Each structure stands twice: as C-alpha cells, then as structure tokens.
Amino acid sequence: MSISFKLQIFEGPLDLLLHLLDESQVAIEDIPIVEITDQYLAYIHTMQELQLDVASEFLVMATQLLAMKSRKLLPALPPSDQDYLDEGLEEEDSQEALVQKLLEYRKFKAAALMLDEIGRERAKMFGREPEDLRGYRPEAPINPVAGVTLQDLLDRFHRALQRAAYVEPEVHVERDEISMEQRIVQIEDLLRVRGSLYFSELISRFKKRRDLVITFLALLELIKSRKVRCVQYELFADILLEVVGLE
C-alpha cells in the first residue's frame, strides 16, 4: 500500500512522529511501531528525493525505529534468550522510552502553542508611553471653613461667657423673654441685611448668660440647616458668619 502525505517542515523527529500519529488517529500509548516506522522512513526518503538536507537527529530516530521494528518482527524467543536480548538494549531504543518522550514533547508543544497565541493577541494591542497628566487634574475647590471646628465656636462662646457680667444676687425663676426660634429669626434678619457678621460682634450684642446661650444654640441650628457658614481666614482670627441659604 502506498503512503502519501503532505511534506512539511518539522522541528525534529518527535514532531514528525506526533504528526504521523495524529494523521493515523492513534494514541501515543498504543503506538504501532511497524506502521509508524514505515511512514517515518517514507518521509525521510521523500526528503532525500527532493535533495533536502536531512538532519542527523532524523536519521538517529530512523535507526532506533528500525531496531524496534526488527524486534517486533522477530519470532518469539525463549524467556532466557529474551532476557539476554533485553539486557543489551539501550534505554533510548525501547518503545516505553519513546512513548514517554512523545508524551513529554506533546506537553511542551501545547504550552508553546498557547504562549504563541498569547503573543499574537498581545501584538494586536497598542499602548502609548506614560505621560504626566497632573496638568489635567482639576484644582481642588477652596474650603471656606477649612480649619474651623465646633471646638473653635465653643472656645469663642466660652470667652464671651467670661466677658459677660455675671450677677446673681438671688435665686429666682424667670420666664424666657425670647425663644430660640425667635432668636433664629433675628439672626436671619440681621444677616439678610448685613450679608456677613463676625461672631464676636453677634455675641457682644447680648450681656445676659441666658441670651448668650439662646443665641449660640440658634447659630448652631442655622449652621446645621446650612443657612449660615463659618469662615476663619487666619489662625485664632475672629470667625466670620456668612449667608448661604437664606432667601
């Protein structure tokens, strides 16, 4: 039976053997030495007819395959003669060693194909050199209340209490002359007219402790509702109250 196959370039004898096994749809573990040897020699013969240089490694593999084929074709020997014959065989001339080499080679070939595919996909990607993008970064807005904390307001309030005249000749209960809601309305009206007001100026309008407390609580409520904001331009400077959401 004549054997025909497409001549192509193989990386080595193991690559050629894998090609022949794939063409024959035969598992490596069940490698038919006789048939594979004939196909392998036919390929070598074709290369020689085309006057192509045949690498020495291809010829070495041909010799090994012929040796294995010869042992397959020999009649069965007595056990003692077979043991003697096996002792003289090189490990690389045995079919088991060839199977292991082919299995190993297939793993490395599959890994090489995978890496080659990754390389081709990576070649489709184009990058650009890194550049300084800090010039495109938006400037952070200036925080008008940066550094102003509730503690700052408490400190100013404490100082106002210390400056306020404290006279309590006797213990008596007085009704509130003004509620916090009314004081909020007073502060809102004042800021609508003035636009801004220093905290010390607002506190200095009141002398009694009760009025100071109500005024401070009303101011905190306006800040909480985002109708008034506090600005301190310098450390330890007076706190400026500015209108934010008053209509």
Image (tube, rainbow, N blue to C red):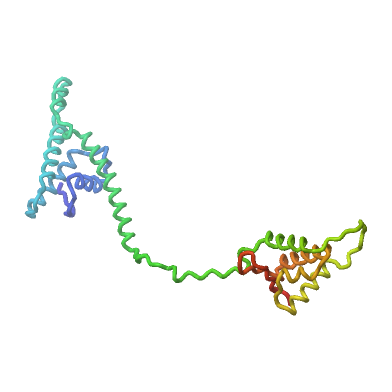
Give the answer, above or below, for where 228 lies relative to 209: below
| Quadrant in the picture for residue 154 | bottom right
Q: Between residues 158 and 110, which one lies in front from this camera angle?
A: 158
| Quadrant in the picture for residue 225 | bottom right
Residue 231 location, x and y as percent? 65, 69
Q: How many marks?
A: 0
Residue 200 location, x and y as percent? 72, 69
Q: Between residues 59 and 228, which one lies in front from this camera angle?
A: 228
For the C terminus, the quadrant is bottom right
Q: Between residues 116 and 160, which one lies in front from this camera angle?
A: 160
Kindly identify the residue that appears in the image at 89 percent across and 67 percent down. Answer: 177
Q: Furthest-bottom residue in view?
A: 193
Q: Furthest-top residue in view?
A: 80
In this rendering, position of residue 76 left or right of residue 142: left
In this rendering, position of residue 25 left or right of residue 210: left
Give the answer, above or below, for where 34 lies relative to 53: above
Residue 232 location, x and y as percent? 64, 68
Q: Between residues 1 and 194, which one lies in front from this camera angle?
A: 194
Kindly identify the residue that appears in the image at 75 percent across and 63 percent down. Answer: 160
Kindly identify the residue that appears in the image at 72 percent across and 65 percent down. Answer: 224
In this rendering, position of residue 31 left or right of residue 57: right
Give the answer, above or below, for where 178 lies relative to 20: below
| Quadrant in the picture for residue 243 | bottom right
Residue 99 location, x and y as percent? 24, 37
